[in-house]
Image (cartoon, coloured by chain):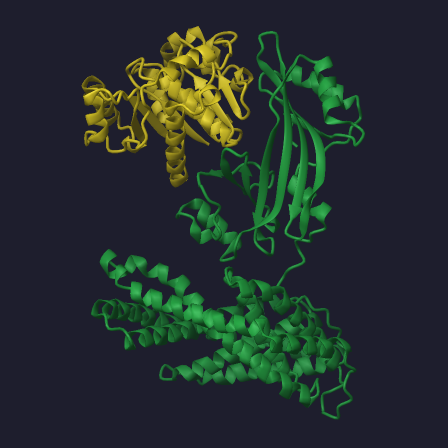
Amino acid sequence: MKTIAIYNIKGGVGKTASAVNLSFLASLDGANTLLWDLDPQGAASYYFRIKAEIKGGGKNLIDGKVDIDDYVKGTDYENLDLLPADFTYRNMDTFLEQTEDPVNRFSKLLKPFAEEYDYIFLDCPPSISAVSESVFAAADILLVPTIPTTLSLRTYQQIMEFFAQQGIDKTKVMPFFVMVDSRKKMHRLIVQHPPSFMSSLLNSYIPYASEVERMGVHRAPLTVFAARSKAAKSYTTMWDELRLHIHLLQ
Amino acid sequence: MPDNQHSFVIPDDQSIPALVSLLQETFPVQVQAEAVYKRVFYDTFDWRLYKSGCALEVHDDGQSHRIYWRADKDGKLKIQLGLKKMPRFAADLPVYEFRQQLQSVIAVRELLPQIKMRIKRQSLAVLDKDKKIVVRLNLDVYWYSTSRLRAAKVLTRRLTIKAVKGYSDDFRLVEEFFLAMHWQPAMDNVMKLALIASGVNTGEYTTRLNLRLVPDMSDEQAFKIILLRLLEIMQQNTSGSIKGRDTQFMHDYRVAIKKIRVALKQMNNAHPQAVNTEYKHFFSKLGNLTNPVRDLDVFLLQLENYQPDFKKSGWQQLKPMHEYLLSTRKEAQKKFVEELKSSQYREFIEQWHDYLEHSETPGSSSDSSGKEVYKLADKLLWGINQQTLAQGNAITENSDTEALHELRKTFKKLRYLIEFFNSLYPAGNLRVLIQLLIDVQDSLGEFNDRYIQIGMVKAFIEHCPDGDAIKASEQIITILEQQQQAAGKKFRDSFMAYSSSANQNKFKEMFVDYYKRKK
């Protein structure tokens, strides 16, 4: 089992779209895949037409008082399951802090899934908090979607500095560019000449595309309703690149 | 079968459209587009993957092409490979865990499309009140073909109900509906089903002799049984050797020839002298034709291991030598194939088969002919063993390569004779003895291979005008000489273990005293 977290402090950078599309592509390979929608806004759950609700709230889940597997729902796609969001996840930091070992809590919660799933994707909320720290510890790969702008690059640097302070293994961080608008000179320049601190940058990037916004209308991954779009093809290329990287990790 | 799905065989009198209508009448189903896809199961000629509980499968739905590797006994997906093209050999893969796993099972054998399936799938989905999929159903018609079966045949028609996680009540409802119809459960492993249907026996190919000789059998009878089995192995590997892609065919073919030559020579009183004279030269010529091909295969395979010893530019300078080896191999393979395709070869093989299968047991007046085979076996095994000890003990640090080469041949004779006659002896210590023999043979084989390889590189240097290529080739010679020395040392250690009194007593007990004791 490989755990892939999609994370950024910033909101609106395409974390959920990336989590939904990459997890779907993983499942298309025939790999048993689980996506955990950790964002209380529940956008990933919405895309998969599953109610963003954990009966009894998220606290019981984090405490380990209930069987986490009972809350997993199959999506409309084979091999792809979802652990839905819940509005109480907004208090997840508090839930975590009440546990014995908050940093390793997610690793412990995910452990029983090792037999069943080949991949677990974590769609993270935009923050640096106890939740994100626990995610960093559990993930084998941390994907950081980044818009090729100066401010976004600064944010990426801040994330890396934070990782360095926390002693987090930086080799598992893999940034990639999203919402790349080829009409914008700055986007083109940054993509062609990425800064040296993005050493493990993925070669593939996701272009800015209206189809990504239409995922909310279709409530489906791009490949389902716009398979020939540039954005869908870019996610496929990115998954091929990631999969090869994962094989090399094994 | 996993508990989240249930498959049934669709009865012959149940048409697929009628079944779809029945489901539409019973459940709120969404009928999805019909799809056709292909599954091709790859394996080696001798089914090494299947026998090891692994499967390498290509899925092709017309849009994408996916390669799956399953190594778990329960068939759980192990790795989905991000490869565009099916690898022909394990060595075609980039170096990572999967290459090692595959190599450990198939070694250098070629992967062949052994079973092809075409599946026509009608998918349906049961929806809840929110139009969310809660149960999946697949109606599949499988056609299959194998390398022996040209036209595709229907393998099975099956209905599979798949649970969607979190909606188990809906799954049970659909499952109970079909359980009440009393349809046969479907076998989970479709590849196994195809093997049964096509009558393919995955265990039918082995290079083991698996002979069942009886102590009281005459040596002539035993001789023919041994030689018929070796002829069978030759014939099983002839067409693969002619194609020349998978070097293992030629290797198996060559080993069979070597064993035939040992049998002809060592059991020379178990058949008429005329047979010996006629066929000795034929098999010797065949064996000699395989020598350069085999030697070059081994060297070419081994060469890539030396890459870390070279700088990138130095490795590039070896290119002319590599090309020389490849072209020499091509030429040697051509000569070998020409012989296999010749009418003279076919005639000889036919005559040989007729002789072994149909000729009367000769009433020769020789001293061993017509006697019980165990006497000959005892005499040969003990005699050759004594020969290995005498030759081995005479080897010193100053012995020449020729002495080690002769000893290697004697050990090989002993090994083959044990394979011929092992059914005459109790199995007890046999495995231990064979392991000791293998250790000695491996070290002698390695010593000999390095000697031959040094000769090949020297032959290249002799005609090479490129100074850089000569320098890089000389570096290879240095590595080979070091390895040859190491193999010589390994030989001394393994021979010491082999010739120890404890192990020799086991040998004596097994091959000489056994029948004396029984009497």
Q: Position of residue B7 (x, y in %)?
A: 69, 29
Q: Residue at x 36, y 59 (%)?
A: B304
Quadrant for the C terminus of chain A in the image: top left
- Residue A6, relative to residue B96: is it above or below? above
Residue B58 occupies quadrant: top right
Foreground of the two, B397 or B459: B459
Residue B210 occupies quadrant: bottom right
Q: Residue at x 59, y 81 (%)?
A: B282
Q: Position of residue B318 (x, y in %)?
A: 29, 64
Foreground of the two, B480 or A76: A76
- Residue B380, relative to residue A143: is it above or below? below
Would you say residue A105 is visible in this rendering? no
Q: Position of residue A71 (x, y in %)?
A: 53, 15
Residue B257 occupies quadrant: bottom right
- Residue B389, relative to residue B425: is it above or below? below
| A95 on left or right of B119 | left
Q: Residue at x 77, y 31 (%)?
A: B184
Q: Position of residue B310 (x, y in %)?
A: 26, 60
Q: Residue at x 57, y 54 (%)?
A: B44
How many tags in the picture?
A: 0
Q: For chain B, what colour was chosen? A: green
Q: For chain A, what colour was chosen? A: yellow
Foreground of the two, B435 or B205: B205
Would you say residue A196 is visible in this rendering? yes
Foreground of the two, B436 or B90: B90
